[in-house]
Amino acid sequence: METKASFARIVVIITALFSAISGIYLLAGGIWLTARGDSPYYLLAGLVLLVTGWLLYRRRAAALLLYAIFLFCTTLWAVWEVGTDFWALTPRLDVTFFLGLWLLLPLVYRQLVAKGALARGALAVSLLFTVLVLGYSIFNDPQEINGTLTASSAAPATSDSGIAEGDWPAYGRTQGGTRYSPLSQINDKNVSQLDVAWTFRTGDVKTANDPGEITDEVTPIKIGEMLYLCTPHQKLFALDAATGKQKWMFDPELKPNPTFQHVTCRGVSYHEAPASAQSGQSAGNGPALCARRIILPVNDGRLFALDAETGARCPAFGNHGELNLQSNMPNATPGHYEPTSPPVITSSVIIIAGAVTDNYSNREPSGVIRGFDVESGKLLWAFDPGAAEPNTLPADGQHFTANSPNSWAPAAYDDKLDIVYLPIGVATPDIWGGNRTPEMERYASGLLALHASTGKLAWFYQTVHHDLWDMDVPAQPTLADITDNSGNQVPAIYVPTKTGNIFVLDRRDGKLVVPAPEKPVPQGAAKGDHVSPTQPFSALTFRPEAKLTGKDMWGATLYDQMVCRIMFHQLRYEGTFTPPSEQGTLVFPGNLGMFEWGGISVDTDRQVAIANPIALPFVSRLIPRGPGNPIEPDASDKGGSGSESGIQPQYGIPFGVTLNPFLSPFGLPCKQPAWGYISGVDLKSNDIVWKKRIGTVRDSSPLPLPFKMGMPMLGAPISTAGNVFFIAATADNYLRAFNMSNGDKLWQARLPAGGQATPMTYSVNGRQYVVIAAGGHGSFGTKLGDYIIAYALPEKS
C-alpha cells in the first residue's frame, strides 16, 4: 500500500513539474509576443501554469479549481480568436484539455490535501464545455461555403463540336483547356459503384541520376481506340483504351542528371492531317505513315513526331522525326531548358515553349516561343519575349535572348481566331530584378496572345508588374463563351494565377471582362531593386482578403503554435506582394501559388467552373554575397540547381535566395489549415458558390490518420455532364469524385502512389472510363510509382 502511495506522490510531482515547465516556456514566449502587440494569452497562461504547478507540488486542491478556470477561459479565448474552426482550435486546446483530464484521475486528485469536490466538479464542467465546443466545431466549419450551382438554361456549347464525344484528344480535352467531358454514363447517381477496370505499369521509376523533382504529372490523351501517355523520363506508351494493354512504346533515351530542375512530362499532343492531305493508302495498308502523329517533348530539349499507329519516327519531320530545340539557344546546357508541357497543335503549326531553370543564373537559355511546321518540322516563326524585336529569327551562329521570360505551363488555342494563349513567367533569376531591362519586363508574368500562324503579337496582359516573387502565370488558361447576367455573350479567357486571382479577359483583344483594378502594394525593395507601386487585383479571386496575423498561426500543440507566432513576427510581412528581404519575407500566397499547373475545369454548358486553390505560405530570404555564397559558380557547382526549394544561387546578381514553406519546428505548416480547397464558381455572376476542404493527412503524418484538414495539391479537376467532377492532386493518395452542384463527396479510391496529375475520362465500346496517373511527386513528398489506373462501372452481365 505504501509503495502505491509513493508512486502516486511521484506522479503528482511529475505533473507539477510538467505544469511548471510548460508555464516557464509559455511565459517566456508570451512576454516576447506581448511586447510586439500579439495576444497576452501566452503570458497569462504561463503564469497560471506556474502557479498550478506550485499548488500541485504543495498538494493543494486549489490547483484543480485554478486549472478549471484556466481551461474554461482558454476555451473562450480560443473561440474568440479563431471561431468554431476545429483544426484551428485543436492546438490551443489539445494539451490543456488532456492535462485537465489527467488532473481528474483518482491517481492525482487523491493525493491532494483536501478532497476538493468543488474543484473537481468545476474542472469536470470545464472539460465538458471544451468537449461541447470541439464537438460543435467538427460539424460547423466556418471556412466552408455551402451553396448550390444551378443548372444552365443555355443551349449546349458547340466549341468542341469537332471532337468525338468519347475522346479526350488534348491535354485539357479541348485545346481551349476546358477539362470538361460531355459523357454522363458515370453520374452523381452511380459513381459510387466505380471500380478498377484495368491497371498498367510503365516500369519508369526514379534512378540515381534523377533530381528530387521527378514527377508523374501526365494526363493521357485518347483518340479512337488508343490512349497515349508519357512517363517522367518521356517514354511514350500507346495503350488499348478498352483494356490498357500496350500497343507500342517509344523511348527517347533521356539522360538526365541530378542538376536537372525537373524530370517530368505533363502530356503529349496529337495531329491528324486532313483527309484531303492524306496519301499513300492502298488496299489493306491503312493510312500513310504519320498521317496521324503524336508530338512528344523531351526534357533535354528535343521534340519528336511519331506515327500514332506504330510509334515509328516520322521520317519527313526534322531529322528523321526529331527536332533539336537547343538550336540557336544561348547557354544550351542540357536540363537548363526543358519543355515539360504538351505543345499546342494547329492545323499546320506546332507551338512550343519550355521551362528555364529558376534562380540559377543570369546567363540561362532563352524563354523563346517557336512555331514549327507540323509536317516538316521547319521553323516558321519565333517570339522571343526578352528581345527588342521579338519576331526576329537569329542568323546562323547567333542566339535568341538569354534569360527571356519563359512559358512552361500548357498553352491554349482558339482555332476560330487562330490565336494561341501562352502563360508567361518572369526572367530568371526570379527573386531580384534590379538588372532587368525594359524588354525583359515587357512580356513578363502575364498572358501572351499570339497569332498562331505567324507568331505576331495579338495582345498581352500583365498579371504581376516587376515580379519579385516568381508569381508567374502557372496554368493553362481556359476558353469559354459566357453569357453574363445581362444576356450578353462574351468570348472570355480565364487565367488562374499563383496570386489566387483569376483574370477574365476578352480573348479577342485582352480587355478585362471582370474588373481588376490596380491597388497599392507594400514598398521597400532590396538594395539595387525597386517595387511596382501597384498591382492588379481581379474581382474574381481566391486570394485571402485579410492579411495574416498571429492568430492564423498553427501547430500540433500550444507550444509550437506559439513558436510559429514568434517566427511570424520575426519575418517581414505587410500583406500580399511584400517585397523579398534579407530579414526574410513571408510570401502569401506562397511561391507554390494558389493555382499551379493544373488550371481549372469549366462546364461551358452550365457556365460554371471547378477550381482547387491552395493556401500555403512560403518564406523568401535574400542571402547577400559572401563566404559560401559566391556571385559566380565555383568548382563545386555541377551546373544546375536541381531543386526548386532550399538555397538558390542566383549567380550574377547581388543575392542568392532561400525559398521554403513556412513550417514549424515539427515540420508542420505554420499557417492553420485548410491548405487546399475545392470550389464551385458561377461564371455568369463570378460568385464562389461553394468551397470545401479536400484531402487528409493520412499519407503525411507519422500515423495514417484520415483527418480531413484540406491539403496542398498539384493537379487539376475534370468535370463531366454527369454532374460529377474528379480530382486526385492532394498530398494523400486518393482519386475522389464530387457532386458538381454542391461539392459533396460521392466516391473515393485509394491509389498505390501519389496522384499529382490531372485525370481524364473517355468512352470506348459504349463504356466510360476515368483514368489517373499514380506515380507520385518527388519534391512534393508523395509516394513514387509507375501506375496508370482506369476506373469504370461494372459491366452488365
Image: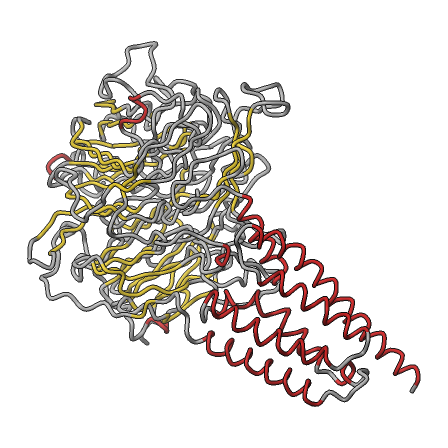
Q: Nearer the viewer, residue 565 or 228?
A: 565
The quarter in which the N terminus is drawn is bottom right
In depth, the one of 734 and 78 nearer the eye is 78
Left or right, residue 94 beside residue 671: right
Image label count: 0
Q: Is residue 239 left or right of residue 359?
A: left
Q: Is residue 15 above or below residue 485?
A: below
Residue 658: image x %, image y %?
53, 36
Nearest the eye: 433 or 591: 433
Residue 450, placed above or below residue 501: above
Residue 729 lies, with reference to residue 261, above or below; the image says: below
Its colouring scheme is secondary structure
Give the residue displayed 50% in from the left and 77% down from the top.
Answer: 133
Residue 350 seen in the figure: yes
Expressed as whole percent of the image width and height from the top left, the position of residue 16 reads 77, 70
In the image, farthest residue toward the left? 487
Q: Quadrant of residue 107?
A: bottom right
Q: Is residue 307 visible?
A: no
Does residue 648 appear left or right of residue 614 in this picture? Answer: right
> x%, y% of residue 382?
25, 23
Q: Is residue 210 above or below residue 139?
A: above
- The image shows residue 328 at horizontal and vertical percentages of 34, 17
The quadrant of the image that shows the C terminus is bottom left
The quarter holding residue 12 reads bottom right
